[in-house]
């Protein structure tokens, strides 16, 4: 496989050549979705690998062995990647997806299956993505923080605009069997967030099992778990990490006042219809 990864557009979203396949994306629209299907939808860098871990553990009653022998990408694959073999997986099919509203299989829009949408404050997403693109081989390293910020605001990045992603998912929420959670609430109270997901998924876990899920899903435990930490990803910088900092408010260490004010202006304009209350820092 050639190592030239480039972004290309398909139905208003940006994908990576050599990884995303148009024929597969087209086919996905007609996937038959089962009521037992569960997918965690995220814009990149919002907590996707965290959800892979959480879903694996909820569906194995908190058994640590479930996340110790198989890599996360095999346990809970990205639905839109052809090698996920989504259609032929046994039920319950657990998956993650970065797809925007317009590209998710249309059966989900008839309230089949369950969707957990994880939102994260976009300044932290941007910082995480900036570091990620400097880290992984499959994405181009940003020219500079400023240049990359412009691209992010315009949606000229992988999976397109964050603003469109959250806006469209939120506006169309009534079509889905969907739960919205935020990265920041998961950071604040992981146990309560997982309990909320269990309630939504109809999974009853006693206190001991719930404790075990929480323990296996902390940043510290995941970072040490080779089946969860994506350490083997092709990288340009061995000092970087997929599980980088895992905190709320790191944007404050990166943004200038002017950049932050510009971001706030665009945010207020673009998020008029989306009454999400984001937590922007750790205080
Ligand atoms: P940072 O780069 O800010 O550290 P995704 O999985 O969607 O690509 O998101 C990656 C981000 O989620 C990274 O953010 C990563 O550290 C963070 N993350 C992953 N697992 C986490 C956990 N258990 N607790 C907190 N943050 C986590």
Image: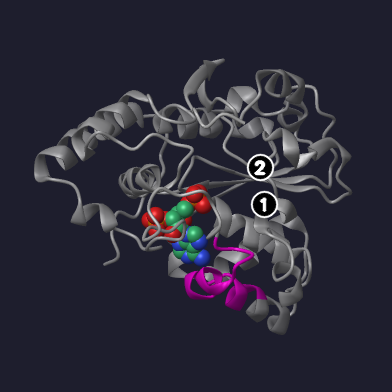
Kind of element beneath mark 2: loop
Outermost front residue: 2
List x then y, in percent, for residue 93.
Answer: 80, 47
Is 213 above or below relative to 121? Answer: below
> What range of the chain is rendered magenta?
213-229
Query: Can you tell which quarter of the image residue 217 is in?
Result: bottom right
Residue 238 shown left or right of residue 115 in the figure? left
Q: Residue at x 30, y 36 (%)?
A: 142
Structure colour scheme: one colour
| Residue at which label 1 appears | 73
Q: Split into 4 quadrants, where in the image is the C terminus? A: bottom left
Residue 78 location in percent, x, y?
66, 42
> Which residue is under mark 2?
78
User: Label 2: how many residues lie within 10 Å, few (<14), some (14-19) or many (20+)?
Assistant: many
| Residue 203 shown left or right of residue 138 in the figure | right
- Magenta segment includes 218: yes
Q: Is residue 99 left or right of residue 282?
A: right
Residue 146: give x, y in percent of width and height: 19, 35
Q: Percent x, y for residue 278?
A: 36, 50
Q: Is mark 1 within 8 Å of ligand 1?
A: no
**C-alpha distance separating marks 2 and 1:** 7 Å
264 up-or-down from 160: above or below: below
Q: Residue at x 36, y 63 (%)?
A: 247
Q: Is residue 41 above or below residue 153?
A: below
* Label 2 close to label 1 by CB (< 8 Å): yes
Is residue 231 found left or right of 209 in the rendered image?
left
Quarter of the view holding residue 267:
top left
Q: Residue at x 34, y 60 (%)?
A: 248
For the N terminus, give its image quadrant.
top right
């Amino acid at each position: 496989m050639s190592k030239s990864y480039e972004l290309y557009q398909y139905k208003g979203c940006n994908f990576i050549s050599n990884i995303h396949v148009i024929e597969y994306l087209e086919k996905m629209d007609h996937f038959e979705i089962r009521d037992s299907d569960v997918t965690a939808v995220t814009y990149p860098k919002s907590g996707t690998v965290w959800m892979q871990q959480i879903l694996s553990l909820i569906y194995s009653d908190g058994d640590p062995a479930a996340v110790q022998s198989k890599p996360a990408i095999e346990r809970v694959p990205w639905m839109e990647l052809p090698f996920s073999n989504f259609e032929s997986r046994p039920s319950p099919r657990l998956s993650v997806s970065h797809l925007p509203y317009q590209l998710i299989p249309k059966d989900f829009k008839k309230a089949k299956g369950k969707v957990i949408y994880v939102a994260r404050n976009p300044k932290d997403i941007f910082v995480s993505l900036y570091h990620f693109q400097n880290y992984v081989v499959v994405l181009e390293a940003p020219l500079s923080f400023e240049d990359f910020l412009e691209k992010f605001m315009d949606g000229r990045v992988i999976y397109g605009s964050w603003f469109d992603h959250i806006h469209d998912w939120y506006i169309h929420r009534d079509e889905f069997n969907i739960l919205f959670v935020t990265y920041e609430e998961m950071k604040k109270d992981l146990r309560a967030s997982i309990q909320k997901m269990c309630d939504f998924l109809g999974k009853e876990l006693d206190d001991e099992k719930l404790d075990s899920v929480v323990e296996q899903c902390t940043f510290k435990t995941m970072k040490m778990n080779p089946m969860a930490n994506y350490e083997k990803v092709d990288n340009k910088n061995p000092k970087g990490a997929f599980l980088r900092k895992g905190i709320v408010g790191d944007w404050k260490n990166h943004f200038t006042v002017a950049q932050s004010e510009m971001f706030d202006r665009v945010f207020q304009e673009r998020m008029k219809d989306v009454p999400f209350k984001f937590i922007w820092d750790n205080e």
